[in-house]
Amino acid sequence: MTQAVNELGDLMSDDRLSQESRFSLPTSAKYFFTALVIGLLLLILLMGAKALRDAPPAAVQVSTKGLTVSQNQILQQAMDQQIVSSFFTTDLQALRDIVLGMAWVDQVSVTRDWQQGIVITALPKQAVANFGTERLVDAKGKVFVPVNNKDLTQQSFANLQGEVSQAPVIMQQMQQINDWYAPLDMYVEDIILTPRMTWLIRFDNGLRVIVDNENTAQKLLNLSQLLASQLSSRRENIQSVDLRYKNGFTIAWHNVELNAEPVLEAVAPLP
């Protein structure tokens, strides 16, 4: 009985091996199908690359958000002049650098949008003061020329003058002075930094102050304290203050007489 079962198992095993041998592919056929699959994949990649290369140039749109009509027009004209490739191959960083190269632009975002194409979103610099007569300056001390000349020399802005490279220093100095003199309701209207690093300051109440580059901050802070204390009752009569002395300062008082010269007075050292 056992021998019969073994013989039956051997026959079934032989049949299975025979079937497997009938369905197995020759080695050459396997290599052929492998090469065919690889060739199809390469063909698909080449066709995809060609499609990208031959795709029409992407449309570049400038978002109107945060821009004036003039700013939007200038930016769109600049983008229209750029040579761009397809939607997927356009160098977004290159476009961003071009937009940031415009002095009046503060921030830029460049994105791909399926419906609009390449979208440029730019935010302009926000001017806080005039710099000379032909430029503006933002809170960071960045000097720029506005798109519209009508934005120049705004009367509500303070006027800064000096070297363009010194603009951040001048802006920081003005902001600090305004903080010190705000309790006196005095704010800088004009501030000039000369090539010799001398500061000329005129406040909105007409008071003029001149100070050198030695202990500048301390001298200006001490003057604000004097104007709030010992000189508070006579503050309106002061025409100008010269702080360029090591052992004190001088005050020029308004003379009530018509066309009379101001009266100079030497004062003790600043506290």
Image (cartoon, grey):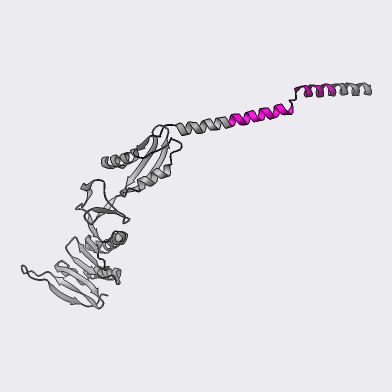
Q: Is residue 239 above or below residue 76?
A: below
The spot of residue 12 in percent (x, y) is: 84, 22
* Rendered view: 23 above or below 145: above
Q: Going 77% across and 22% down the picture, which residue do you hit?
A: 22
Q: Nearer the viewer, residue 110 or 34?
A: 34
The stretch drawn in magenta includes residue 31: yes
Question: On the picture, is 248 further left or further right than 40?
Answer: left
* Residue 164, picture quadrant: bottom left
Quadrant including the N terminus: top right
**Is residue 12 highlighted in magenta?**
no
199 with respect to 44 (left or right): left
Quick check: can you spot residue 192? yes
Q: Residue 155, position in %: x, y?
A: 19, 53
Q: Which range of residues does the magenta coloring cover?
A: 14-41
Residue 56 quadrant: top left
Q: For this rendering, which residue is in front, 32 or 189?
A: 32
Identity of the residue furthest to the left in this view: 258
Q: Main secondary structure of the magenta part?
A: helix
Q: Position of residue 122 (x, y in %)?
A: 34, 44
* Rendered residue at 31%/39% (across/down): 77
Q: How many marks?
A: 0
Q: Specify whether residue 228 is in view.
A: no
**Residue 63 as seen in the image, left or right of residue 35:** left
| Residue 121 sits in quarter | top left
Picture coordinates of residue 239 (x, y %)?
A: 15, 68
Vertical side of 249 occupied by 129: above or below: above
Quick one: 179 or 206, which is closer to the camera? Answer: 206
Answer left or right for 237 relative to 118.
left
Q: Quadrant of the C terminus?
A: bottom left
